[in-house]
Amino acid sequence: MQGAIARVCMVVTAAILNHPLLFPQENTTPPEQEDEVIARMREHQERLELEQARLENELSQLDSKQEEQSSSEEGYSWYLWSTVSFVIFFTIEMCRVNLSDTEIRPVEDEDLLSESGAITPRTMVLDKVVLSNFCDKSNYTSSHENWRVREFVEGFTDDLLESLRSVCDGEADMEVGDFVGIGSMFESWKVCKPLTCDLIVPFSPPDPYSFQFDLWCSPSCDMPPDMQGCGKIKVDGFREDKEGCLCGSANLGEDMLCLLHGGEDTVQVEHSPEELLCSRNTHLLTKDQVMKWFQISLTKAWGRISHKYDFEVTFGHLDAAGALKIRFRSWKVIVMNIIPVVQLEGTDAYFVPHFPSDYASSPDPYWTLSLAVYERRLLKHFAQRLPQNSCHLHCLQIVTFLHRKQTVLTGKSALTNYHLKTALLHLLLSKRPSAWGIEDTEQRLRDVLSFLQRSLHEKRLHHALIGNSQVPEEVQLPEVLSKAEPINLFRSLFLQRELYAATVRHFKEMLRNAPVLIQEFTPPLSNGGLHHRLEESL
């Protein structure tokens, strides 16, 4: 009996002493030693499990003997000892499993955003007059420039897509729908030049083919964990059997008549998967083929209507299909990103092959799901409930301006304008509408930057809509997305330490330079000088 109690104490003591939470400094191992440490932990865990099994067997034998030799009260005491020991051991092992699932970060990662003397959003100096001038300037830009640019872009895009439809063969090529404007220009928070317009153009396969979708959140999905927020697109409608009439796939000529089909019968033309932009030997839609098709078709479409316009159009590279730059004789430049997308059936969500601002895109055959239409709808929802002349878009304009200027100084990082917009949407969902008055600009700006700082520190920034129960019903987000698990937009920072360090440095320098950059953007000029400076800079 005493020996069994001693063995129980030994197992529990060994588990506690070897638990990583007891000596956290031992986890700060260099990267090359992490695999060895994890292997030793797993080996030790296996030994403990074997010891636990042997101990339970011995205790069961002792319990059976005890029942024969002692009273029922003593038997219950042994059951109590066994149960308590197992609960303690199981609790410790569960803590070990939870910790092993967590990425082991070096001390340097923890200290990147908490250095002594570093500027934080709460301590950086912001001049209320300068902020007010910035808001006045951005208001002037939005009201006097953006609406004219949008009007031109919408008319030009309609003409270009109509020409593109005439280029595409209606029976053998993809069908192109109407464009949808997204992004800062169409959400009225664009502040930096060049003037950039993002437009998505949905396309679909010809009859009788259709698209089938496999989302990352589907029960039967087998996508890798780093492909959260993505989906695969399968082209459906291919004939599996080789029997039947060949008049739909063979060129019989005008003088030949099919004996099975009359002259008035309509026969659907059959296509191979490659003709419908699928990857080789599969029915999965490939992004590379789609971008190549769209770039070639768009170039041909412009060639048909170029004589109607008095400006120069330059197309981007194949890896940025649909990117074009319009240069007028006055040297004014407008950048357009016309992106081919696939609409998720029954929703306003779109599968996008690439985003112009992404530092990395998902590989084939995974398509990123964009909820830009729902995000624009959410901003409109808030615009109807926030105070008149609210500061939420001003805060986003200031942060994106600082991010853009800092990128010019220190280069690209993992931080994008979409991350900044996501931070703002989270705050809009969590704060009361009355907190977004124009007089609260400084405080809300600090809140946005603090939210970003905390998200970088935790390497966790959840998507504003997916899996968020705070999204209003008026946005009409599909249930499959509202019920899904939240997506961490900063997940890649766990695996890419150099990118994380560069992003943190970028953010810290942005905070340090913020007062100077804002001051340079809004110099203390008279009204006439201010309007002249606005026209020059925009």
Image (spheres, grey):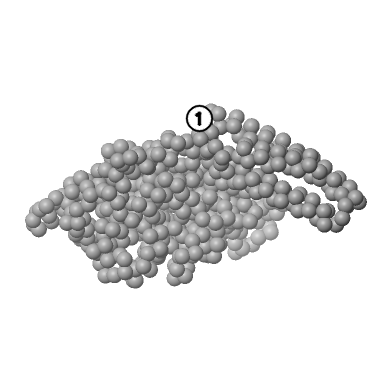
Q: Picture coordinates of residue 80 (x, y %)?
A: 76, 53
Q: In which image quadrant can residue 163 be found?
A: bottom left
Q: Is residue 200 above or below residue 410?
A: below
Q: Amino acid at mark 1?
A: Pro
Disc 1 element: loop
Give 30 or 265, whichever is nearer the viewer.
Answer: 30
Q: Is residue 10 above or below residue 228?
A: above
* Residue positioned 46% across, 60% down in the render: 465
* Residue positioned 49% across, 41% down in the render: 494
**What residue does disc 1 label?**
30
Q: In which image quadrant can residue 8 be found?
A: top right
* Residue positioned 35% across, 39% down in the render: 115
Give 410 or 437, whichever is nearer the viewer.
Answer: 437
Q: Picture coordinates of residue 267 (x, y %)?
A: 61, 59
Q: Picture coordinates of residue 445 (x, y %)?
A: 29, 56
Screen quadrant of the N terminus: top right
